[in-house]
């Protein structure tokens, strides 16, 4: 802040000459006033009009977020009224406005204190660093032969960078200039110490014929279940996008545990009252052994005295290398297998160890490890064993994992999964934290189609709406703990390329529903009979655009949902029976996996019996049990007839159920609010 209380500055740069104007501001709302002064002067002096303005998407240029989206602000309206074409850069892409970014960095390098007099002097000094013949008279610049050079482009730079949803720094310079610079520096030093202790690289001269890949710092605050900061993390990551296949890497596939597997393990924890503990592998990817010869530039802020003469020859994997996750998984698999843990055939990231009456399950989710066992001695052995091979953090009883808070009442035999913290975060991100709740995300009669997608001017306005970000955020909640929004999230996802206002209102309605139900948790309870039960349903031609039907299924275990799906069918069904039959095929394919996975855990004896799958269509039940086809069903693809084989082999039983009790109904269509709520409760979703 300068002596007059002006704590912001704004620059305007002519793209042709690179000449810069700089104005001091009290608030960012004064950006338009500064632009008007700049516009009046340059157009009067040069005799040319400003045609294009490039800015980032800051609120002072683009408009502020409101409940209905990012509304057009005064700056944007002024450009529109004056026929000036705006060019907005994408979030997190400063290179799209590189002229302004580089110039502002030069200014900041020249001055250490933000004082008006010094800043103005240096801005003029910076202009003198341009070509010798920049000025004969302003407006009499030597013309280039390219006629396109007649277009004058002014670039605007905003000094207050948007850092992201969690206000974490997005660059090295932001980190060292932030209020938490000391904490970020300590985090970077800790990361470099890990690099050194793990002997990740050697400093060498770059061999002829090799090209080093780049690297950068990534900063992240790790938070607990209440949203409080636990620690500051700085990760040195490679610019893996510069790697060349066949030279810098070959295979890249790495498995990750399925959400269904995690929920099944947690169900067994609740039912059998198992110990549930968590461990975290620090800098996990640094343990992977590289098979290729890879060179990397030295990290920013930690270069050796020889500078650019040396590069890092990687001996081990590093974050963001294309093969990094694969090499870490292979390393962990070798280590854990040596301790007599056996990998699940149905999920490569689930391991188990059985010794007489003692049993231990291990869930690997990248670098997070969950241990579930009926013997505390195994926990201590695992802690000691893993600590001898990796740098581990022992976190005790599990309370928060992969964004899911775990509530547990061992006396009552109850375990619940909640994403309240995550939901609060996305509500704040999209300015919906104070919105009015609604009782259902979608109701009977709500219809959406491509006819509601915008065209022409409305399409341009909809580009300002963060529709895809909202749908992506909702999808994570749906996949983890919220089967109640599976149908509406799937529907919204079909219009991400060109959403309309009706689609945007529907997305906000889902956020309003989550506002009222954010304290719901997916609950599993100890029960007398531990059996998997499935429900299969379908609407008929629910997709207005293609007349395809929507299938849905859900599987219950210990009173809570463990697996669910809502999706548009790949074929156009010609009858309700065909639509239900296709849905039943999908629903009978999933229990084949569920049955094999649970049987491999060797804890649930009832899994050996045929699984029950309920359907509310009598014709489907008849077709599944009988090898008969008629004139209206003989065209059904042969692959869907696999249902009969599953029933014949007694892998499952298809039973009829009344439509009023069909638990998969909310996964295929909108429903009346009261009926919808009853189904949600039956799914195992309850308030905390």
Image (spheres, helix red, strand yellow):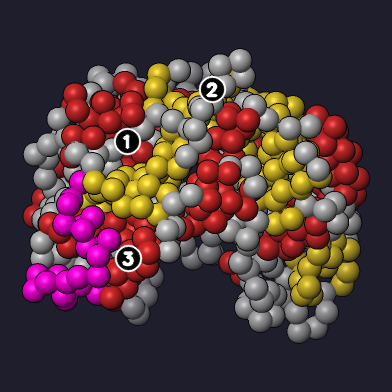
Asked if residue 467 lies in the magenta stretch, the reply is: no
Q: CA distance from mark 3 to mark 1?
A: 30 Å
Check if mark 3's residue and mark 2's residue have beta carbons within 8 Å: no
The front one of 222 and 172 is: 222
Q: Of residues 58 and 120, which is closer to you in this image?
A: 58
Looking at the picture, tell me which residue is in the foreground, 492 or 626. Answer: 626
Q: Which residues are magenta?
A: 616-637
Q: How many neighbours does mark 2 have within 10 angstroms: few (below 14), some (14-19), or many (20 or more)? A: many
- Of marks 3 and 2, the one in the foreground: 3
**Which disc is residue 484 wearing?**
1
Could you tell me residue 161's position as x and y percent?
Answer: 49, 39
Q: Quadrant of residue 510?
A: top left
Which residue is farthest bottom? 209
The kind of secondary structure element at disc 2 is: strand
Question: Which disc is residue 414 wearing?
Answer: 2
Q: Give coordinates of residue 221: x percent, y percent.
A: 63, 33
Residue 266 occupies quadrant: top right
Quadrant in which residue 26 is drawn: top left
How far apart in space, not on screen, are marks 3 and 2 (Cα)? 37 Å
Q: Is residue 502 visible?
A: yes
Residue 634 painted magenta: yes
- State whether residue 444 is above or below residue 215: above
Marks 2/1: CA–CA distance: 20 Å
Q: Is residue 15 left or right of residue 233?
A: left
Residue 644, which numbered label? 3
């Amino acid at each position: 802040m300068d002596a007059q209380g002006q704590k912001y500055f704004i620059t305007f740069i002519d793209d042709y000459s690179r000449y810069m104007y700089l104005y001091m501001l009290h608030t960012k709302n004064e950006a338009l006033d500064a632009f008007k002064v700049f516009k009046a002067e340059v157009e009067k002096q040069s005799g040319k009009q400003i045609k294009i303005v490039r800015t980032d998407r800051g609120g002072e240029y683009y408009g502020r977020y409101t409940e209905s989206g990012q509304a057009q602000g005064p700056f944007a309206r002024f450009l529109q009224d004056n026929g000036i074409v705006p060019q907005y850069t994408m979030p997190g892409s400063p290179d799209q406005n590189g002229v302004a970014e580089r110039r502002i960095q030069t200014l900041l390098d020249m001055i250490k204190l933000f004082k008006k007099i010094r800043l103005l002097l240096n801005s003029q000094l910076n202009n003198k660093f341009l070509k010798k013949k920049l000025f004969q008279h302003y407006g009499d610049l030597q013309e280039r032969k390219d006629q396109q050079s007649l277009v004058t482009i002014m670039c605007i730079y905003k000094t207050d960078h948007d850092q992201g949803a969690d206000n974490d720094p997005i660059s090295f310079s932001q980190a060292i200039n932030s209020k938490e610079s000391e904490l970020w520096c300590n985090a970077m030093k800790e990361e470099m110490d890990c690099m050194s202790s793990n002997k990740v690289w050697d400093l060498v001269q770059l061999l002829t014929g090799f090209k080093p890949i780049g690297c950068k710092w990534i900063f992240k605050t790790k938070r607990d279940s209440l949203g409080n900061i636990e620690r500051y993390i700085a990760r040195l990551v490679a610019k893996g996008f510069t790697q060349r296949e066949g030279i810098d890497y070959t295979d890249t596939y790495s498995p990750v545990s399925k959400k269904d597997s995690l929920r099944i393990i947690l169900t067994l924890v609740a039912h059998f009252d198992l110990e549930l503990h968590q461990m975290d592998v620090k800098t996990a990817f640094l343990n992977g052994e590289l098979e290729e010869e890879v060179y990397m530039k030295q990290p920013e802020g930690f270069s050796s005295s020889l500078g650019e003469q040396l590069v890092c020859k990687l001996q081990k994997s590093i974050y963001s290398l294309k093969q990094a996750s694969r090499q870490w998984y292979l390393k962990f698999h070798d280590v854990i297998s040596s301790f007599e843990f056996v990998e699940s055939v149905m999920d490569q990231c689930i391991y188990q160890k059985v010794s007489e009456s003692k049993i231990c399950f291990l869930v690997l989710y990248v670098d997070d490890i969950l241990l579930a066992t009926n013997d505390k001695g195994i926990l201590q052995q695992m802690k000691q064993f893993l600590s001898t091979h990796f740098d581990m953090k022992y976190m005790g009883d599990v309370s928060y994992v992969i964004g899911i808070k775990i509530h547990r009442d061992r006396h009552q035999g109850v375990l619940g999964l909640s994403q309240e913290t995550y939901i609060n975060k996305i509500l704040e991100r999209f300015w919906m934290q104070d919105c009015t709740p609604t009782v259902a995300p979608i109701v009977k009669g709500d219809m959406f189609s491509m006819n509601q997608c915008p065209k022409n001017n409305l399409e341009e306005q909809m580009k300002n709406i963060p529709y895809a970000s909202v749908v992506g955020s909702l999808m994570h909640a749906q996949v983890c703990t919220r089967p109640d929004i599976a149908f509406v999230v799937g529907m919204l996802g079909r219009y991400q390329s060109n959403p309309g206002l009706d689609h945007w209102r529907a997305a906000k309605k889902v956020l309003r529903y989550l506002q009222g139900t954010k304290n719901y948790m997916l609950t599993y309870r100890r029960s007398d009979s531990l059996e998997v039960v499935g429900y299969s349903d379908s609407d008929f031609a629910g997709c207005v655009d293609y007349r395809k039907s929507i299938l849905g299924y859900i599987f219950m275990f210990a009173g809570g949902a463990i697996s669910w799906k809502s999706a548009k069918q790949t074929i156009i069904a010609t009858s309700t029976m065909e639509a239900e039959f296709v849905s039943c095929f999908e629903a009978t394919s999933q229990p084949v996996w569920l049955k094999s996975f649970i049987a491999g855990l060797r804890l649930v004896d009832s899994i050996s019996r045929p699984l029950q799958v309920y359907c509310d269509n009598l014709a489907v039940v008849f077709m599944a049990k009988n090898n008969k086809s008629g004139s209206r069903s003989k065209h059904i693809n042969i692959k869907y007839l696999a249902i009969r084989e599953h029933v014949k082999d007694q892998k499952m039983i298809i039973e009829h159920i009344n439509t009023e009790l069909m638990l998969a109904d909310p996964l295929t269509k909108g429903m009346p609010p009261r009926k919808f709520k009853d189904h949600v409760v039956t799914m195992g979703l309850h308030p905390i």
